[in-house]
């Protein structure tokens, strides 16, 4: 499968496939630039478990991290990779996925 820009130039999407929870600082930059609702911010409690942020019990949150919420919605625009300051995202080329 080949991909193109509007005027027909070659374009290879780079899909976001993982976010390293140990490296992510939960800054939210990737969330702000993503137009596809691929990610969501969650909390991690003392036990290292993921918890929702809107449960009204913020004291038990040790750290916030970004997680993949709807991976299949990603269009591979690469915007999240450009803004991440922590080098914690992994993208896969659409060319590799369809090879
Ligand atoms: S590559 Fe684009 S669409 Fe995919 S998660 Fe990143 S910002 Fe969202
Ligand atoms: S931009 Fe990077 S460090 Fe910030 S929340 Fe997203 S994945 Fe985490």
Image (cartoon, rainbow, N blue to C red):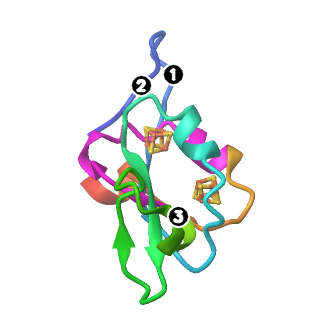
Out of 10 and 73, give the one closest to the viewer.
73
Residue 54 spot, x, y in % from top left? 38, 50
Mark 3 lies on residue? 65
Mark 2 lies on residue? 4
Residue 26 spot, x, y in % from top left? 61, 59
Cβ of disc 3 within 8 Å of ligand 2?
Answer: yes
Q: Is residue 98 above or below residue 65?
A: above
Q: Mark 1: give few (<14), some (14-19) or many (20+) Cα within 10 Å.
A: few
Q: CA distance from mark 2 to mark 3?
A: 33 Å
Q: Is residue 66 left or right of residue 50?
A: right
Contact check, label 2 and label 3, Cβ < 8 Å: no
Residue occupying image coordinates x 27% and y 48%:
70
Q: Along the polypeptide, which appears first: circle 2 or circle 3?
A: 2
Q: In this rendering, which labeled residue sits more in front, label 2 or label 3?
A: 3
Q: Along the polypeptide, which appears first: circle 1 or circle 3?
A: 1
Contact check, label 1 and label 3, Cβ < 8 Å: no
Q: Is residue 45 above or below residue 74?
A: below
Secondary structure category for the residue under label 3:
strand
Magenta region, residue range? 65-82
Q: Mark 3: give few (<14), some (14-19) or many (20+) Cα within 10 Å.
A: many
Secondary structure category for the residue under label 2:
loop
Q: CA distance from mark 1 to mark 2?
A: 5 Å
Contact check, label 1 and label 2, Cβ < 8 Å: yes
Which quarter of the rendered picture does the C terminus lie within?
Answer: bottom left
Q: Along the polypeptide, which appears first: circle 1 or circle 2?
A: 2
Q: CA distance from mark 1 to mark 3?
A: 36 Å
Residue occupying image coordinates x 26% and y 53%:
98
Mark 1 lies on residue? 9
Q: Examine the structure image and report whether residue 46 is included in the region drawn in magenta.
A: no
Residue 17 spot, x, y in % from top left? 39, 61
Q: Is residue 89 left or right of residue 15?
A: right
Residue occupying image coordinates x 49% and y 62%:
58
């Amino acid at each position: 499968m080949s991909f193109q820009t509007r005027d027909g130039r070659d374009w290879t999407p780079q899909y976001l496939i993982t976010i390293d929870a140990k490296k992510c600082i939960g800054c939210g930059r990737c969330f702000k630039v993503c137009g596809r609702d691929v990610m969501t911010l969650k909390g991690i409690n003392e036990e290292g478990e993921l918890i929702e942020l809107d449960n009204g019990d913020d004291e038990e949150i040790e750290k916030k991290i970004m997680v993949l919420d709807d991976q299949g919605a990603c269009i591979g625009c690469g915007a999240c990779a450009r803004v991440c300051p922590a080098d914690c995202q992994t993208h896969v080329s659409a060319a590799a996925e369809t090879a």
